[in-house]
């Protein structure tokens, strides 16, 4: 027994030694910066003088005295409300189309996925040209139908719709995940439904959507995190007035244009709390709409009724 314990302790020690580089990296590059950022959020620091403790002043000022904070939060929230469902719907629609068996389907899958791997800066420059009121692609096409296109990025009323339209560019990334989920659905379920006389729509509602709900859940969580962290396109393309002032762009301006590091840190932690609360709400609601086949099979083995 003593020999066994000694061997076990040695194996544990070796295990810890193997993961030591990861632990050190996690502590140095994740835990320490996060802790330092929390401390900075309670200070006033301009990079050139030592940080000065100000308590909750940064948070109070953000929430009660800064109209640009609320404007940036409003822009980001509206963008998220529209872009996340559209992204999920677009990705799922394309995946359903490309899940069919026809000649050249792999070429189409590659074409739809390619935009997802293009650099964010390159994509932003491309869309800046597409939205150009004078020589942009969209207004050129509209002019062929006798329609005068708006100033997509120069008119405050059209800036946010332009960003929402642009968000559909990346549906290929979600499409790949949906395709993997579709291929995991047992064919026997569709065969049984056909025997029962179910049509395409009934099979989609009763089989495809429930079986894909874990994938939708994953894409929803990632969509919330990504939408609230929108930065590159807003930084490159801009917008009329504050119509394109996204939350992270305003955070960047506070930190690296105005050198208000403590203020920006407080803003970052408010964003963290917003995303955390939204994520927890989605997790909380998942019991009502996410179906896990593995859990269903386990319950069947245990004799539990669903």
Image: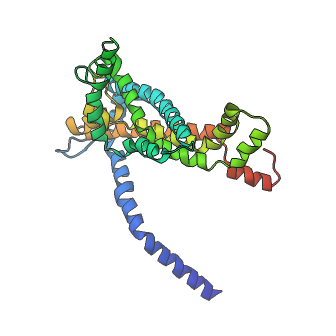
Residue 245 lies, in percent from the top left, at: 31, 27
Q: Is residue 83 above or below residue 240?
A: below
| Relative depth, front residue between 252 and 168 | 168
Residue placed at 47% from the left, 38% from the top? Answer: 223
In this rendered view, identify the residue nearer to me: 305 or 180: 180
Placement of the N terminus among the 4 image quadrants: bottom right
Residue at coordinates 35% horizontally, 14% vertically from top-left?
A: 145
Q: Residue at x 77, y 43 (%)?
A: 192
User: For residue 216, which quarter of the picture?
Assistant: top right
In this orientation, which residue lies closer to the viewer: 205 or 141? 141
Q: Which residue ends up furthest to the bottom in the rendered image?
A: 3
The image shows residue 296 at horizontal and vertical percentages of 73, 49
Q: In the image, is 296 to the left or to the right of 112?
A: right
Q: Is residue 64 visible?
A: no
Q: In the image as oriented, which residue stretches furthest toward the top?
A: 146
Q: Quadrant of residue 121?
A: top left
- Quadrant in the picture for the C terminus: top right
The structure residue drawn at horizontal position 48% and vertical position 45%, both measured from the top left corner, is 104
- The spot of residue 284 in percent (x, y) is 61, 39
The answer to whether residue 219 shows anywhere in this view is: yes
Left or right placement of residue 48 versus residue 247 in this view: left
């Amino acid at each position: 027994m003593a020999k066994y314990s000694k061997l076990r302790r040695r194996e544990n020690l070796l295990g810890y030694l193997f993961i030591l580089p990861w632990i050190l990296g996690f502590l140095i590059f994740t835990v320490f910066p996060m802790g330092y950022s929390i401390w900075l959020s309670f200070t006033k620091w301009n990079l050139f003088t030592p940080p000065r403790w100000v308590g909750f002043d940064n948070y109070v000022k953000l929430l009660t005295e800064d109209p640009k904070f609320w404007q940036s939060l409003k822009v980001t929230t509206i963008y998220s409300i529209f872009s996340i469902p559209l992204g999920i719907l677009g990705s799922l629609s394309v995946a359903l189309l490309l899940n069919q068996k026809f000649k050249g389907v792999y070429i189409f899958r590659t074409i739809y996925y390619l935009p997802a791997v293009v650099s964010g800066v390159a994509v932003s420059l491309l869309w800046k040209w597409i939205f150009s009121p004078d020589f942009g692609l969209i207004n050129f096409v509209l002019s062929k139908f006798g329609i005068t296109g708006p100033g997509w990025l120069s008119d405050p009323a059209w800036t946010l719709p332009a960003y929402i339209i642009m968000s559909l560019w990346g549906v290929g990334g979600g499409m790949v995940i949906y395709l993997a989920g579709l291929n995991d659905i047992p064919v026997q379920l569709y065969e049984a439904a056909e025997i029962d006389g179910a049509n395409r729509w009934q099979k989609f509602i009763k089989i495809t959507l429930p079986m894909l709900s874990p994938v939708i859940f994953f894409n929803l969580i990632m969509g919330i995190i990504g939408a609230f962290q929108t930065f590159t396109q807003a930084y490159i393309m801009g917008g009329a007035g504050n119509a394109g002032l996204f939350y992270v762009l305003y955070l960047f301006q506070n930190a690296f244009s105005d050198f208000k590091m403590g203020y920006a840190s407080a803003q970052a932690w408010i964003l963290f709390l917003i995303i955390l609360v939204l994520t927890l709400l989605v997790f909380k609601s998942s019991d009502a709409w996410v179906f896990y086949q593995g859990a269903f099979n386990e319950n069947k083995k245990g004799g539990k009724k669903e």
